Amino acid sequence: MRKAFVIVSTLSLAAFALQFIFAAVGAFTEPAGDDAYTLHSITGMAVIPGLTLLTILCAVLAKAPGRIVGLAALPLGLVVVQALLAGLANGSTDAAGASTPFGLTIAGLHALNGIIAVHVVVSVHQAARKLANPPAADAIPVSVRAGEPA
């Protein structure tokens, strides 16, 4: 089950990386429209939450420490924050439908929250890899200094 934890956390990391690509596709689509962010929306509202739930399940079944299980669950909360920030940013327009400074600030927080989520997913992936490949009990740490043969 620990290998499954690594695989699912890798897929989750890939999905988060694709989110940034899909956001860029939406931002640079001309003419811009609501459908420009379809891939970004589907990935953020369905794929990532599904993979996060699967990652939590794998962490529990792999008997990961509680800290790692909690870390694996954190992206789910960050996705909820993402949806709230996106809704608030989209709703913060003037009478003509143009972006406001407040809305743009919230949109910036949406991007920042996405970066934080990626860092969390990287940490989960690293923890999963450590759990799946623990150091050998009889391994002796060796330090090698520059210029000395190994």
Image (cartoon, rainbow, N blue to C red):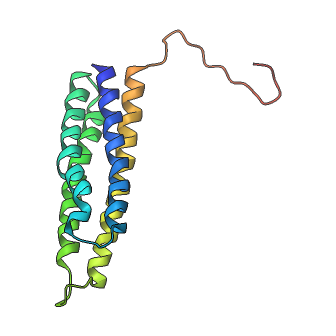
Q: Residue furthest right?
A: 147
Across and down, in percent, residue 129 comes to 41, 27
Across and down, in percent, residue 5 comes to 30, 27
As rendered, which of 5 and 96 lies closer to the eye? 96
Which residue does the image show at 79% across and 30% down from the upper left? 146
Which residue does the image show at 18% across and 37% down from the upper left? 53
Q: Is residue 13 left or right of residue 55?
A: right
Across and down, in percent, residue 149 comes to 80, 20
Which residue does the image show at 31% across and 21% down from the upper left? 2
Image: 56 above or below 94: above
- Count of marks placed on residues: 0
Q: Residue furthest top?
A: 138
Which of the 4 quarters of the picture holds residue 92? bottom left
As rendered, which of 28 and 2 lies closer to the eye? 28
As rendered, which of 45 and 57 lies closer to the eye? 45
Which of the 4 quarters of the picture holds residue 65? top left
Rendered-image quadrant of the C terminus: top right
Across and down, in percent, residue 107 comes to 30, 71
Image: 125 above or below 150: below
Image: 33 above or below 96: above
As rendered, which of 19 and 63 lies closer to the eye? 19
Q: Residue furthest front?
A: 31
Which residue does the image show at 20% across and 74% down from the upper left? 90
Rendered-image quadrant of the N terminus: top left
Q: Residue furthest bottom?
A: 95
